Image: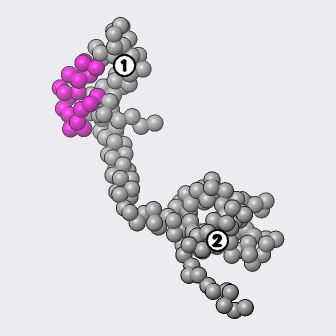
Amino acid sequence: MFIDYYELLEISPRANSETIERIFRYFAMRYHPDNRDTGDEARFSEIVEAHNTLKDPVKRARYDIQYNDRLEHRRELAEEASDPKSIERDSTIQAKVLSLLYVRRRQDVNSPGIGDEELERLSACPREHLEFHLWYLKAKGWIARIENGMFAITVDGIDRANAEHRGNAPLTRLLNHS
């Protein structure tokens, strides 16, 4: 598990060795297990580990590579979370998967499954993204894996798909034809 040593020591990633040493001494005295008021052995161990890594130029350079990768990942996460179309795209893919499985069940009630690769191809969603949608739809109880390992829509999934289409489809006037 990655620990942000800069956050732990409350210093900038650009901190020089003197700053690292000064802050380490402060936290080491504060969290040393012998300190009866504020001692914390687990926190002290983390601080020693952070200090030992950041004071050594080679270890720090290796750590900074991991740190920058994490920073980039957090930036991408924040960027995607702020994109309002992201959740809309997810909803569209989930509705498409439900529709595909709905039609498959309707076409052949005795063999209602679609395999992973075929779902990936039909939904035009890469496997690494499709896994999230399949997890969600399974967790909601709208789809399930059947005996042969394929995905099939459940009764609850059919109800969900019908409710979605009822809300989006224009009303037809069936009574006018009688």
Please, what is the three-letter code of the amino acid marked with disc 1?
A: Phe
Tell me, yes or no, if residue 144 can be seen here: yes
For disc 1, the marked residue is 44
Q: How is the image coloured?
A: one colour
Tell me, yes or no, if residue 151 can be seen here: no
For disc 2, the marked residue is 162
Classify mark 2: helix, strand or loop.
helix
Residue 58 appears at what percent x and percent y?
A: 30, 35
Classify mark 1: helix, strand or loop.
helix
On the image, which quarter does residue 169 sit in? bottom right
Closest to the observer: 64 or 132?
A: 132
Residue pictured at 45% horizontal, 62% vertical:
87
On the image, which quarter does residue 37 sit in? top left
Closest to the observer: 5 or 139?
A: 139
Residue pictured at 68% horizontal, 67% vertical:
158
Q: Is residue 172 left or right of residue 69?
A: right
Q: Is residue 126 magenta?
A: no
Q: Answer with mark 2 or mark 1, whichever residue precedes in sequence.
A: 1
Please, what is the three-letter code of the amino acid marked with disc 2?
A: Asn
